[in-house]
Image (tube, rainbow, N blue to C red):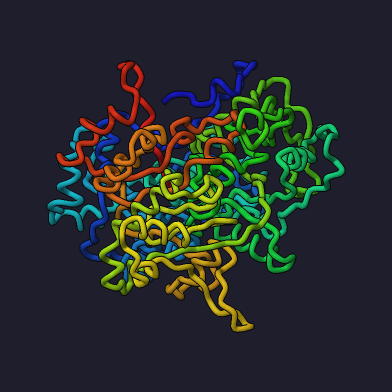
Amino acid sequence: GTDLHGPIIKQKNSNRSPAIIIHNKLTMASFADAARFLLLTAVGIAGNPSTADAASASPVSGWRSDLDWAALNSKLSSSASLIDTSYDDYTGECFPEFSVPIMSRTNHALIDQPSGMCLPWLYLGWEMSWPRPSENGHLNQTADQALQDLLINPPTDVESWLADPTNPSLNLPSKVLFPSIASDVVAAVNFAKENGLEISVKNSGHSYQGASSKKNTLLLNMNRYTHYAPTGITDCDASILGSTVAEDLSTQPCLLSLAKNKSSLIRVGGGENFDKVYRAVIAANEEEGYKYHLVGGAAGTVSPMGWSWQGGLGGTTGGRLYGFGVDQVVQLEMVLPNGVHVKFGPTEWEDTSAEGFIVPRTKVVSGVCRSNPDEHDEEKWIWGRCPEDFDIDFNDLYFAVRGGGGGTWGVVTSVFLQLHDYLPFSPYFFNRFPSPTEECSAIAPQFAEFKAKYMSAPSLLNVTKEHSLACGSPDDLAFLICIGEEDVMQAWARFLDLNNSTDPAKVACLFKLAQENNEGVMESPKGWAELIMLLNTNDRFPGKVPDAPTPSPIGNLLAYVLVPQSWLDESEENIKTVLEHATNPPYYAFGGAAASGSDQANSLSQAHRNAAFMVFWFDDDEANFWGNLFPKMFDISDKTKFPPVFGSNHA
């Protein structure tokens, strides 16, 4: 394997144990491997393998029993848990949810299972999401065979593959640690380093690639880690503006926020997902009168700990106003592969508003190390200068983490995220389901065109850029989500008028979602999380922010294409071309602050910054993406440089 940490953690003492490699399945062996993922879609499971007993509580038996697991256990806090796990735990705890009627399934039922092994797409428990037995990760098998097995003509053997605990394609960890504090993570990483173990890291497991699960690894399931969000909101004192950053970096988050003209932050623990974080923000808003807004994911079971590091699309939470998930990070706390517990963030920056950016450019990132890593009481943690025998380049680390993928550079134990001032929330809905009228069904293609123009070519509708950027959308035709001042209904009426379609019934196909309050007045929900909780029809986990998509055997693994804004600007016909041939509605989380919200010190690709939107693309003969549109959208004049085409979601 490649040492991913070489450029960042430079060991001066060659006698020290080598840094462990923290597992990340984003890097694939070849393009052929990637192709196997391209077209897999959900299929049913034949049969229901038998359930098994809950995970064993023994920390010393099972996988790698030659190691002194008792020594690791002795260093853990009393609330941490180290357990053996097995295939039987996966079938017994996880399989039943996939037999629940699909509209009643939820990842909330999987996240808290005792073994911590469950995944939102069942086949992720096998290498390449492919249960066919293989001794080498399917390297000798073809994408065509995968399509036959999983989509076109599933063989009768599938049931036996799933039921076989000796299937060599199984990709499940055999030992799971539930840390509760940072010292538990430090102990685990040091134990892995000393014994040459590989580590996998999981928050909620919401990943189409199954990047949190791998066989023959020690899995750190962060779900039971300290929850900071319920009491984690900080309102910054403007009087500190202009002061020097404290040596222990305690004032760094607020100083950076104030430099961005923001006044509030929230600290989020390494095991908290957006359900927990959104509910913390809602509770604070209800207590203090709606003053906070968080840019986050569209589903409650998505986690800031995966979402942010892969980019973080805020199509439903104001990403086009405030930037991607990577742009919300103010300070990071991590345990690195060398076992050192660090926190770090920008300490020097400069104004770049004259260059069109809405946040300062990061010039210097500083970090500190904890000198008492065995101390369990956070109130007694001591932060100071990092050990001299390690030269940690915090500038490189800050760049790599924000955009370079989760579970790669270390274990994130907490992060300070930017909060923004609350603005009015306006959710619009196009009457496409569950009972669309005849008029609305007939003009659905026109609404798709309107939506694309409102988002990516607003001048064609006489819409201002500011009103356009107030709105975004997930890859769902029905929703159009706005924050702050917008003119959606006026623009929709103008669009229909320009298309000689002024029938009031058609205008009414688009409407603002609202409910009657206690005073009998119709009002919209206060935010995205509140909206989807209101619309949720699954009553199995009341009060939680619902998740999407629901658990299924295999996730939708078509490739996302980042469509450049510059190509769309060339011709109005280009929008129509995309809408005709894309497999799904565009994901509108791009433009505006997606470009101007960067601190210019992160590794998210410039293609994300310059995109108009993102779509799935099924490359059939009619669409001919690679042969026709690809060379028009992207500069391919330099044959040694493949252009950045692909975006990501659910990573």
Q: Above or below — where is 403 with respect to 113?
A: above
Foreground: 535 or 628?
628
Specify whether residue 60 is in view.
no
- Residue visible at 74% across and 36% down? 370
Where residue 398 appears, x then y in whole percent? 61, 31
Q: Above or below — where is 508 with respect to 15?
A: below
In the figure, residue 382 lies in which quadrant? top right
Where residue 91 appears, x then y in whole percent? 34, 60
Foreground: 369 or 507?
507
Where residue 92 appears, x then y in whole percent? 37, 63
- Residue visible at 54% across and 25% down? 5
Specify whether residue 530 is in view.
yes
In the figure, residue 212 lies in which quadrant? top left
Foreground: 307 or 200?
307
Q: Above or below — where is 393 with respect to 133?
A: above
Where residue 22 appears, x then y in whole percent? 50, 35
Q: Quadrant of the N terminus?
A: top left
- Residue visible at 51% across and 69% down? 533
Q: Above or below — where is 583 with respect to 563?
A: below
In the figure, residue 511 lies in which quadrant? bottom left
Is 615 left or right of 76, judged from the image as shown?
left
